[in-house]
Amino acid sequence: MAKQEETGSTVIFEGTPERFDLQWDFLNVKPGEWIPTENQAVKPDEWPRMRVNFRVQRLYKGEARPEIQIITGLGGGDCGAIFAPGLSFLVFASGSPKGDLRVSMCSPGGWVGNSSVDTELRYLRKERPIARDLEAVRPLTAEECTTQEEKRRHDFEEYQRRYAAVTGKICGTVAAEKTRGGNTGMVSFLSLAGYSPVAHPTATVNADRSFCSQPLGPGKYYLQFTRSSEEGLTSAVYYPGVSERNKAAVIEVNAGQTQSDVTFNVPVQKTYSVRGVISTNDKSGLNATSVYVSLVSLDGVPFPAAYTKPINFEGSFPLPKMKYFDFENVLPGRYLAYVSVVGQGWYTKKEELSVTTHMRFISLQLMHKK
């Protein structure tokens, strides 16, 4: 199996991720330019994705270079591979030697301290195989299944012990006003090296206001408290209790250590209205669930869209090709307004807006090219 994995890969290396960058064509388009709103399944190359820059420690296949970049998904359903900063990984990447190298959650390899990659490492390093490496795959008896289950449990406990030794944690308490419905909020741990807006480490705030992260790779982190309702974000604050990231404190995580004295003060934040209209040249084919307007945060809020609403173009009163929308409780910050449509041939223009101390009104367009 290790031999087949090597044959099917373009580049194989051991390395440490040093930089994580979000790649999304939508962010690079100039405001006012027409951009397609097609279903993402039509053009996978235009999906949001992560570009991860690795410092190479040992190369097994491919052109020798000190750094290698790979492309993967955001995680959370798009098969994106997840890498923790500060740790070493065995990476099997596929693609063109001179183009993008891609890795998914189904790719071989993984954290080099995990026993599941030991066989691959022994093969790649041309070391002598152990008996387990050469075991034939065959149906197991009931007794053997019980033994395997015990072994898997033992291996997982050993993995947790190893992983805890090279990672750290951040734990503490949140001082915030209670909300109706008991929504205690969530703390995100955002690496200064970059992070996926979807699959970054998070911890739910407990009923007693305590929180504790999962094991984090060594490095520096921002902490962000967020709380939301059905309409979108209602709080977005950086540790120790500021709205702007450039005023936030940084917490450093060291291997085998837990920061347990963090007190996160969350002030009450004012919100403002964002209202507007969407006009279209053709409403045929648009139903109650095919059009959405979203506000995408440009201030580092770790969510694909901070606020989203469906727009129903069905009906003819009062204006058949123009619809009104409103977001009543939007946190201050910079946003991109974007219209998404299920279906091909639709185009829109993104608009940038800054929400400060008063209501904002914007006008969006939706055009179908026949």
Image (spheres, rainbow, N blue to C red):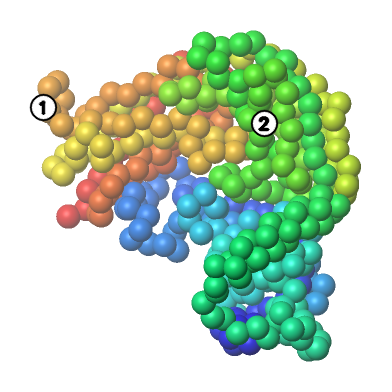
Q: Quadrant of residue 123?
A: bottom right
Give the numbered dot on residue 176. none
Q: Quadrant of residue 184?
A: top right
Q: Which residue is mark 1?
A: 316
Q: Which quarter shows the C terminus?
A: bottom left
Q: Residues within 10 Å of mark 1 (few under 14, many from 20)?
A: few
Foreground residue, 259 or 137? 137
Judging from the image, what secondary structure is the residue with disc 2 in? strand
Foreground residue, 293 or 184? 184
Q: Residues within 10 Å of mark 2 (few under 14, many from 20)?
A: many
Placement of 312 over or under 105, stated as above or below: above
Q: Residue at x 72, y 28 (%)?
A: 211
Q: CA distance from mark 2 to mark 1?
A: 45 Å
Residue 166 left/right relative to 134: right
The picture places residue 368, in percent across and down from the top left corner, at: 22, 48
Give, as a three-letter code, the residue at label 2. Val
* Residue 323 is at least partly visible in this image: yes
The number of numbered discs placed on residues in the rendered structure image is: 2
Q: Which residue is mark 2?
A: 187
Q: Residue at x 57, y 62 (%)?
A: 105
Give, as a three-letter code, the residue at label 1. Ser
Placement of 234 over or under 340, stated as above or below: above
Judging from the image, what secondary structure is the residue with disc 1 in? loop
Q: Residue at x 80, y 77 (%)?
A: 58
The picture places residue 29, in percent across and down from the top left corner, at: 47, 50
